[in-house]
Amino acid sequence: MRASDFDYDLPAELVAQHPAAERAGSRLMHVDGNTGVLEDLAFRDIVALLAPGDLLVMNDTRVIKARLRGRKDSGGRVEVLVERVLDDQRVLAQVRASKTPRAGRELLFGDAVRAEVVSRQGEFFELRFAGEALDILSRHGEVPLPPYISHGPQEHDEGRYQTVYARVPGAVAAPTAGLHFDEPVLAALEAKGVDRAFVTLHVGAGTFQPVRVEDLSQHVMHAEWYSVPQATVDAVTKARAAKGRIVAVGTTAMRALESAAAGGADGPVAGTAETKLFVVPGYRFRVVDRLLTNFHLPRSTLLMLVSAFAGVEPIRRAYAHAVAQRYRFFSYGDAMLLERLRP
């Protein structure tokens, strides 16, 4: 298949610029390409769609304030978007400036925050802060809203562009399928006997990049760090033994689980690693039975992933239906519950 097979027309007004008034106030489309089911529901109906013994696997990454605005030591303005925190002081970042800063130069933020340009690594720069990186970002950074959101970060974004179960700081983009869950929905699922487990995958800014080559075999996937704990592996084993379904909350949880099983195992193996897993139609899913996700950008790797999972034609029909029914798209938009297409 080619990148143009995953293009579609989206009216600009359907790109959600703000979250719904309530987290669980979004719409939910249920799509099953095996039976032809395409249902328009409310997100709170997720409780009725899951059964006792099912397992929700969620990404507990926490979005950091990854955007910094400042100046070079030569005086020119600079904007930094941290892609990844490497250690206590070092980060990998995109740097926008009128002239590319060279190694050894300093970037200045606020009154006293300095970062040295250590080296350039492709499109990224390694920076070393004169202090603890996460603390500096927390005090001086901005919420890194996606590029298709036209306004700057507002007061509500700091809380709403974060899941209620976010725990491990490191993401520069939210695992957006999880944004719909609030405490009452989680409590209702727990009362029903739906179990929960967690993985961590620190979402990078590359998640917003379209595929720029027509031949998908030529696409180079961006790398992301993930961790699958033994407790989650055990929860998957338990759910399968009880005939429960493994439900990934978001494509990031899906990629972590499938990456952890990519060595040929039928289930995930506990551990921490980098993943560059690029899922296109024809991929054999080893772990996940159902996927909760938002609507994705045209020509994106995430649209290719959901097409591989639920079927190319079912996804095309679902997206056309979503446009016709005025669903809200992308990070602050509505959700879909997808059933894995059986061979």
Image (tube, helix red, strand yellow):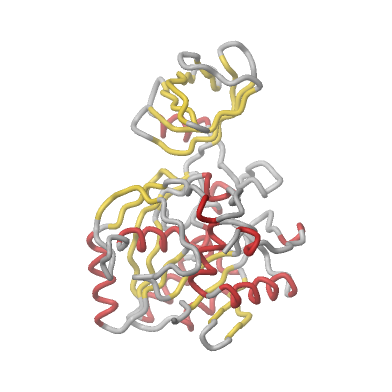
Q: In this view, does 4 lie above or below 161?
A: below
Task: From the top left corner, tell me how far across and down residue 275 is, in percent.
Answer: 38, 51
Of residues 235 and 26, the one drawn nearer to the viewer in this rendering = 235
**Image point (26%, 57%), residue name:** 229
User: Residue 287: where, in percent of width, then height?
Assistant: 34, 70
- Res 246 → quadrant: bottom left
Image coordinates for residue 253, horizontal then vertical, percent? 41, 61
Q: How many labels does the image show?
A: 0
For the point 70% across and 44% down, the residue is 151
Residue 52: x %, y % from top left: 35, 83
Q: Is residue 63 left or right of residue 325?
A: left
For the point 37% across and 66% down, the residue is: 57
Quarter of the picture containing the N terminus is: bottom right
Query: For residue 240, which quarter of the picture?
Result: bottom left
**67 over 329 or under it: above or below:** above
Closer to us: 167 or 98: 98
